[in-house]
Image (cartoon, grey):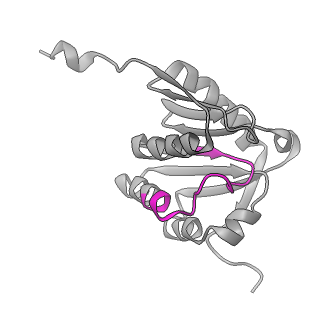
Amino acid sequence: MHDPEELVQPQPERCALSTRREYRDALARLIGLAQRELRIFDPDFSDLEINSPQTYELLRAFMLRGRNNRLYIVVHDTGYIRNDCPRLLNLLRQFSDRVFIHQTQAEATSAQDSLVLADKLHFVRRPVQAQPRATLRLNDDQESQGMHLRFSEIWDNSFPAVSATTSGL
């Protein structure tokens, strides 16, 4: 017999974020909550502090939590990642079979939002990347489905753009 409290799903939570710091804190929280996959779309990552030691350790811990964990990243421009994110590139080398960095093409290049999705259950989204305002949703599989579809549309209009190996040498 199951304890009735074990069967209770956590209630969906919604939180309005108004600063870039709150958005970065929400990113860290989602990385910590992720159990299987993280999907991140941002125009160039320059505003996410993705190369900080703290974010690197969170992402590395996520990758080490499970052999099937995956990290999907899509950007409009890979320049910041290539030039200013050695920790992320190290993560890509270390987990090259499970970390994927793509660049948008076609209609996806006009996407203006930013999105971080954890396990089709939690997400944070800025409707316009240039604005600090965002929404954090936790334990919300209904709303997360729509965000997963949004990410999938962008992913489907992208191509592999950063690899673990240096080519052309």
Residue farthest to the left, as pictured? 1
Asked if one can make out residue 79 in the rendered structure from this viewpoint, the answer is: yes
Is residue 48 located in the magenta-colored stretch of the structure?
yes
The quadrant of the picture occupied by the C terminus is bottom right
Q: Residue 40 occupies which quadrant of the picture? A: top right
Q: Residue furthest bottom?
A: 169
What residue do we see at 11% from left, 15% from top?
1
Question: In the rendered structure, does residue 143 fall within the stretch colored magenta?
Answer: no
**Quick check: 58 above or below 4?**
below
- The answer to whether 141 is drawn above or below residue 118 in the figure is above
Is 168 displayed left or right of 97 in the figure? Answer: right
Please name the residue shown 76% across and 65% down the image. Answer: 79
152, 51: nearer the viewer: 51
| Quadrant housing residue 32 | top left
Taking depth in this image into account, of 22 and 112 the one nearest to the observer is 22
81 in relation to 5, above or below: below
Please determine whether, in this image, residue 29 is positioned above or below residue 140. below
Q: Residue 26, percent across and down?
A: 51, 40
- Depth check: 130 or 89 in front? 130
Residue 80 position within the rendered picture, expressed as x and y whole percent measured from the top left: 72, 64
Task: Residue at 49%, 69% (x, y): give it.
Answer: 94
Instruction: Name which residue lies at 73% across and 54% down.
Output: 44
The magenta segment is 39-57
Query: In the picture provided, is 105 more to the left or to the right than 148?
Result: right
Does 134 sit left or right of 159 as displayed?
left
Q: Is residue 162 visible?
A: no
